[in-house]
Amino acid sequence: MNKRRVSIPMTLAVILLMAAPSFAKTKEQKQADVRKNANETLAKLYRSQPSAKAAIKAAAGYAAFSNFGMKILPAGGGKGQGIAFDNRTQKVTYMKMLEVQAGLGMGVKKFRTIFVFETKDAMDHFVNNGWEFGGQATAAAKPGD
């Protein structure tokens, strides 16, 4: 009984802390931050794997995301944002990522990831339908602000 009273307030606190920084920014500021993070992620990838630059340039497109999450006892979650970039049309789609975790644990994580799409159909499916991963955690990326 006592565990339940502790976990609900802690979970709410985590959600509020994760959402707080986004309240003060305009849409343009948020988009600029997302583009900056995507460019930094690509730059790090190109430094560690120079051949990735040619692979991404030859691909139909790519998506770059940054994510932050917390896990406190029985529940956890995370959120992130990123862009999907269509190499043919040069169109940028701003997207959001949400993550839900179940199971006992404790910790904080921050990561960045890049998806490379070989075909236009794969790129379009990602942008229009998002992405889901099953297992301990579920993450979904959907078009957003």
Image (cartoon, rainbow, N blue to C red):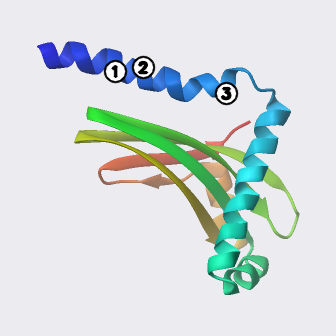
Question: Which quadrant does the C terminus fall into?
Answer: top right
Along the viewing direction, whichever of 132 and 77 lies nearer the viewer:
77
Q: Residue at x 29, y 50 (%)?
A: 136
Q: Dot 1: what SS?
A: helix
Residue type at the position of mark 1:
Met
Q: Residue at x 75, y 84 (%)?
A: 54
| Residue 16 seen by the camera | yes
Count residues near mark 1 (Cα–Cα under 10 Å), then give few for <14, some for 14-19, many for 20+. some
Question: Disc 2 marks which residue?
Answer: 13
Give the residue at mark 1: 10
Looking at this rendering, what residue extends furthest in the right direction?
Answer: 89
Distance in Å between CA atoms under marks 1 and 3:
20 Å
Q: Quadrant of residue 56?
A: bottom right
Above or below: residue 78 compared with residue 52: above
Task: Look at mark 3 in the image and give the residue it sits on.
Answer: 22
Secondary element at tag 2 = helix
Q: Nearer the viewer, residue 59 or 36?
A: 36
Query: What residue appears at the point 16 percent right and 19 percent down from the top-left corner?
Result: 3
Dots 1, 2 in contact, CB < 8 A: yes
Q: Amino acid at mark 2?
A: Ala
Counting from the top left corner in percent of width and height, residue 108 is at 40, 43
Q: How many other residues sit within 10 Å of disc 3, few (<14), some (14-19) or many (≥20)?
A: few
